[in-house]
Image (tube, rainbow, N blue to C red):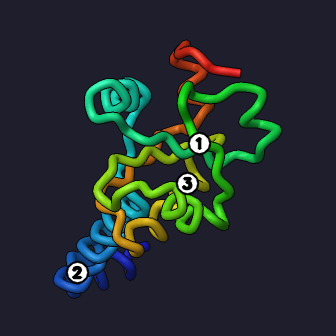
Amino acid sequence: MDTFLLFATQNILVFILLAFCLLALFIYEGKKGGKKIDPGEVTRLINKESAVIVDLRPSEEFSSGHIAGSLNISPQKAEQQLSSLKHPKDVVLILVCKTGSSSKGVGGTLLKSGYSQVNLLRGGMMSWQNSGLPLAR
């Protein structure tokens, strides 16, 4: 341990650079796929911005309960299905999955294809339900 501390003090610039790179990596990975928003912000975007909710869960899960007005779209075909629905690229999109983790990849794809306002429901449908918000069936 003493050797490590000696090495660290002699190479302080290297450790500062390493810490900076790790911080930048965490920030970059955190923003990947779109802006993460909580259920309260989702309801605000639905009411004020006419947001389009895209539910990426399988149809069985979607039919057991979903956010009212949401579209059930396959994650593999999200870009094609959204473009066939004639939504403009500047529409406010909210991507929803079960836990909030799998929507990140779809969000990244949509951002690369030109959609500018991609949002991810933080915690997915689990957080929506835990917040006591209503589900349509």
Under circle 1, the secondary element is strand
Q: Which amino acid type is shown beneath numbered disc 2?
A: Leu
Image vertical order of residue 69 relative to residue 1, above or below: above
Q: Which residue is mark 3?
A: 103
Calculate the distance from the C-alpha at mark 1 to the C-alpha at mark 3.
14 Å
114 relative position to 16: left or right: right
Relative height, residue 134 to residue 29 (above, below): above
Up-down relation of residue 31 to residue 66 (above or below): below
Measure the C-alpha gap from mark 1 to mark 2. 45 Å
| Foreground tag (2 vs 3) | 3
Pointers 1 and 2 in contact (CB under 8 A)? Answer: no
In the picture of the structure, the residue carrying the numbered disc 1 is 71
Question: Which of pointers 1 and 3 lies earlier in the amino acid sequence?
Answer: 1
Residues at badges 1 and 3 in contact (C-beta under 8 Å)?
no
Q: Which mark is residue 17?
A: 2
Identify the image quadrant of the N terminus.
bottom left
